Image (cartoon, grey):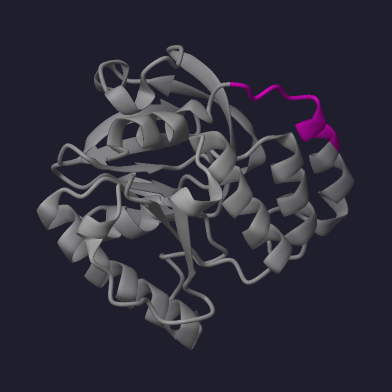
Amino acid sequence: MKPFLLLATRADDDVADAEHAAVLRCGGLDEGDLVRVRLEREPMPDLDVDAYSGIVVGGSPFCTSDPEEEKTPTQVRVERELSTLLDRVVEQDVPFLGACYGVGTLGVHQGGVVDRTYGEPISAVPVTLTDAGRADPLLDGLPDTFSAFVGHKEALTVPPPHAVVLARSATCPVQVFRVGENCYATQFHPELDLDGIVQRVNAYRDEGYFPVEEHQQVLADLRRTRVEVAHRVLRNFVDRYRR
């Protein structure tokens, strides 16, 4: 089998390693089935997209909608490299799944508007499939409404004109969209279970996702939630595109 490719941008080693492990677990992949590139550490290598079964972009502390003058040189480089890669990915309709940060990268690349209108606090939210989502193989086996973990400062306000919206939540009108037949992005995190999101809350407690004084309350609220099927998105992606 050709491996899948995980493009990551998390500088915290523990969080980055946990994300990698979660993609392996939720995708049903062995270690050798997933190549990881940490873009926050090194420039994008010269990639042959045909060498991979599919490409996964993990979440990120970067926000596409940050003012340009506030972006670090690393963020500027990563955005430029991902945009260049997406030129090829979209043109060739390469299997692509962007989780959270993928909405910003793929959405902006394809002409959508990403801003802070529909940010969602770290929580579990009900995600509802659209008619198109109920028919899409990426979401096969998911109920019409399911819980998923979110936590994002930005989101799509206006989808790309040719995108197909597959799922939404009450507080975020685009939770999943597709471009072409094989390029997807989710606003929620299909790789996260409770332990994973608790780790991220602790790692990013000072990064503006919630008031610091609410840290323990955020954790308590999360521990009362049940998120059980959102990970099927990753498994469906792997099962559909492994080759």
Residue 19 visible, this angle: yes
**14 above or below 94?**
below
**Front residue of this view, candidates 167 and 236:** 236
Instruction: Estimate the x, y position of residue 84 in percent, counting from the top left.
Output: 23, 71
Is residue 226 inside the magenta stretch?
Answer: yes
Tell me if 123 is positioned left or right of 160 in this view. right
Residue sitting at 23 percent across and 66 percent down?
48
Residue sitting at 53 percent across and 27 percent down?
230
Residue sitting at 44 percent across and 75 percent down?
67
Is residue 40 inside the magenta stretch?
Answer: no
Marker count (numbered): 0
Residue 100 visible, this angle: no
Tell me if 114 is positioned left or right of 112 in this view. right
In the rendered structure, which segment of residues is drawn in magenta? 220-228
Instruction: Estimate the x, y position of residue 199 in percent, counting from the top left.
Output: 76, 50
The image quadrant of residue 166 is top left
